[in-house]
Image: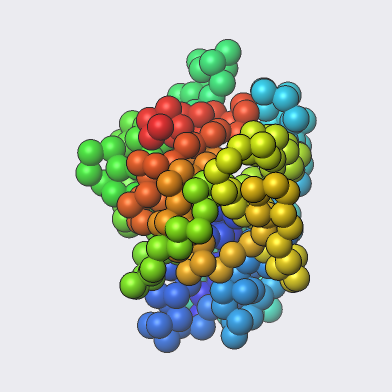
Amino acid sequence: MKILVCPLNWGLGHATRCVPIIRKLVTEGHEVVIVADGYPLAFLQQQFLSLRFIEYPSYEVYYAAGKSQVGAMIFNFPNILKGIIQEHIWLRNLLSKEHFDQVISDNRFGMWNKRVHSIYMTHQLMIKMPVNLKFMEPLVHRIHKAIISRYTECWIPDRAESGGLSGDLAHKYPLPRNARFIGTSTRFKELKDIQANDEYDVVAVISGPEPQRTIFEDYLLTRFRNRPEKTLIVRGQPQIENYHRRYIGNITLVPHLSDTELAAVLLGAKKIVCRSGYSSIMDLDALNCLQKAELIPTPGQTEQEYLSLIHN
């Protein structure tokens, strides 16, 4: 089959969890084309040198610098809605010019078409709302369910048993008819015989949209600059081609690491500090490192706040 894979550009997580799916499709002999932009595009281009890529932007989303994202989300809503409509039209135009048998969309709401087998991937069927908007959760859930119904299938990257890793996000409500659990999806799943690299006491991994990515980096630098622990900060910037290292006291900063390098330092670290994004949690779980991780949610991102609560 000829398959289009379309991860959302909202940090690197949506792209990283598509890696094992793309690998499996390629191994099975399918022709895979990837639609992405920004950090996910750079990351996936490094992962799959021989595949074809189409650069198409995700929704323009801006995070607030403070502890609440409610105002930012309200501000972003027109851009998100416009982006959903535009990507839906873009896909329709692409399919009129080029045949695809299947489209796999990781959290891109508009990447479906009735003429092609369309798959929507998400771990967040239930969308957590801020405390003062909790009353809207059932309504938002119904809206999301209506979006999911546009797709042929909904894949949930989690285990079905005992609340999995996503807890309420995928397990609270009955599943839509077209939804099923596919097991956790992590880029580390197929790595074999990784030797732990115990060079660093602390490994911090940065991810997420700006300005919160930079705010998190500044926080980590302030926290560990004068500490005795040898610390590695992975800045989550795969688009930087020259992976030169910077040194600030006992801190080493690197823009990005390959999957094998990252897995090795995570395995060898005494402590891991990262955002409580779901893909990060799946990665740490696959390495059996979740128990030594300090999960720090992006301020005001309710999904991450919930995940940090159940996994810290």
Most foreground residue, 212 or 86: 212
Image quadrant for the C terminus? top left
Q: Residue at x 67, y 23 (%)?
A: 67
| x then y, percent, for residue 113 | 56, 61
Residue 216 vertical placement versus 252 (above, below): above
Instruction: Determine whether, in the image, residue 202 is placed left or right of residue 74.
Output: left
State the image coordinates of residue 209 (x, y, percent, origin top left). 69, 45
Tell me: residue 268, above or below residue 244.
Answer: above
Q: Say if residue 60 shows up in the picture.
A: yes
Q: Give whichever of 33, 228 is nearer the camera.
A: 228
Looking at the picture, how far across and down is residue 21, in whole percent? Answer: 43, 68
Horizontal side of residue 193 vs 136, given as left or right: left
Q: How is the image coloured?
A: rainbow
Q: Residue furthest left?
A: 161
Count of numbered circles in the view: 0
Residue at 56% from the left image edge and 21% from the top image edge = 130
Q: Position of residue 310 (x, y in %)?
A: 38, 30
Which residue: 72% across, 25% down?
66
